[in-house]
Amino acid sequence: MKLYGFTLLKNGIKYDYSFRESIFSMAAITEKIYIALGDSEDTTEEALKELRNELSSVKGEDFLKIKYTIWDPELRSGGLILSRETNLALNFLRSDLKKCGSINDCWGFYLQADEVIHQDEYMQIIKDIEQANHNGYDAVRFRYLHFWPDHHNIAINKKWYPSEIRAIRLNTAIESWGDAQSFRFAQKIFNSDAHIFHYGHVREKDSYLQKKADILKLYHSDGKLSKYKRREKKLDKQTETLPFCGLHPKIMKERILRLGDQWIFPKKDEIHIVGDRSLFSEEFISKINVDKIYFYKSKREIKNILKKKSKVIIFSPNWLDRIIYKDRVPTSMRSKLARRWSNEFILTLKLSQREIGLKD
């Protein structure tokens, strides 16, 4: 099984996209990356060429392949230009492989310019795609973490999709559609527990506001823009978030610090967890950034520390526990399509409520 990357890009500098971090993370698991580069109004082309040269010195010549495109203003409806550009990159990849006669057992891995994968999950992503390939699947769907409005909160309400297809078998009819959120015509989809870190709503403020205003123009006519701007503001106010003090991809460190957010949270003195320790790996427990961690089988065992409710986590709380211990963490995102989070991710979110992070 061989894995190739593909993506689209336009005005990456103007809108402060994390495209460098996205491409670098994708480069770690792919043979080559194919990019549809739109007619930008900034220095994105120059930045991408510099990135291509940097990658070529590590991954070999011609690793980053660029297809120059012109965005069609006639596709200003429902974001269709985004799927068109994605499919241009995808077909660029497919046609290149067909010339070599080597498209069988080849997969495409897709990230948008504001999506990044974590280095600790590289092997899981490869393993899951290999398993999908071996067992007759034609697409792999990954979990999503949507950061909003900073790097230390994730959005979880119904507006935000809990997972999407990001890997596809190339010798199929699968294609991007709509506004390129996902792919269609997949017949058998494998669900991976690896995550896509989505940073589209965390960027330099002025660039973000400009991007939000301009992106609406890809969906709606001029006469409807005011209406949908008001709608976006209303939806933003309704966004439900949870604190996240977990580890970001290392490639994001410089950017996160540049935007004024923390990289690692200060160490805490202690935490008391009511829950089965065997639900979590020892490797995960060792990463919890506290001096002392105590596990208890039942709430009866913590009566002597009830005054320290801020230092207690009930892993499987009832409704009263949620009130007493101020626990807002559900077991999944709010969407009906959401799968239950892993035990370790749920505990990460519960720790985050206490401003407890993980060690780098």
Image (cartoon, helix red, strand yellow):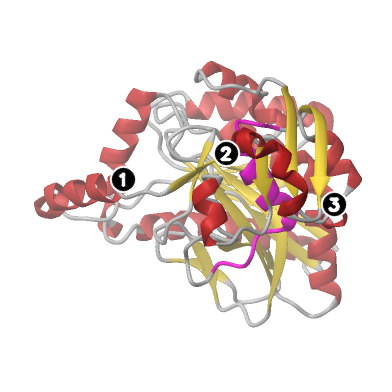
Judge depth for marks 1 and 3 and give the one in front: 3
Tag 1: amino acid: Asp
Residue at the left extreme of this rendering = 223
Which residue is labeled 3 in the image?
Answer: 277
Gap in angstroms between the C-alphas marked 1 and 3: 38 Å
Q: Is mark 3 on a helix, strand or loop?
A: helix
* Mark closest to the chain's N terminus, 2 or 1: 1
Q: In which quarter of the image is the N terminus?
A: bottom right
Q: Is residue 70 visible?
A: yes
Q: Is mark 1 on a helix, strand or loop?
A: helix
Q: Position of residue 122 (x, y in %)?
A: 80, 47
Gap in angstroms between the C-alphas marked 2 and 1: 21 Å
Q: Residue, x 65% and y 27% (percent of image)?
A: 51
Name which quarter of the figure residue 266 lies in.
top right
Gap in angstroms between the C-alphas marked 3 and 2: 19 Å
Q: Give the range drawn in magenta.
A: 338-357
- Residue 10's place in the image compared with 79, above or below, is above
Classify 10 Å Cα crowding around label 1: few (below 14), some (14-19), many (20 and above).
few
Q: Residue, x 76% and y 54% (percent of image)?
A: 275
| Residue 346 belongs to magenta span | yes
* Mark closest to the chain's N terminus, 3 or 2: 3
Question: Residue 236, labelled with which disc?
Answer: 1
Name which quarter of the figure residue 233 lies in.
top left
Q: Residue, x 62% and y 58% (percent of image)?
A: 317
Q: Position of residue 109 (x, y in %)?
A: 68, 56
Q: Position of residue 331 (x, y in %)?
A: 60, 60
- Residue 128's place in the image compared with 207, above or below, is below
Tag 2: amino acid: Gln
Q: Is residue 360 visible?
A: no
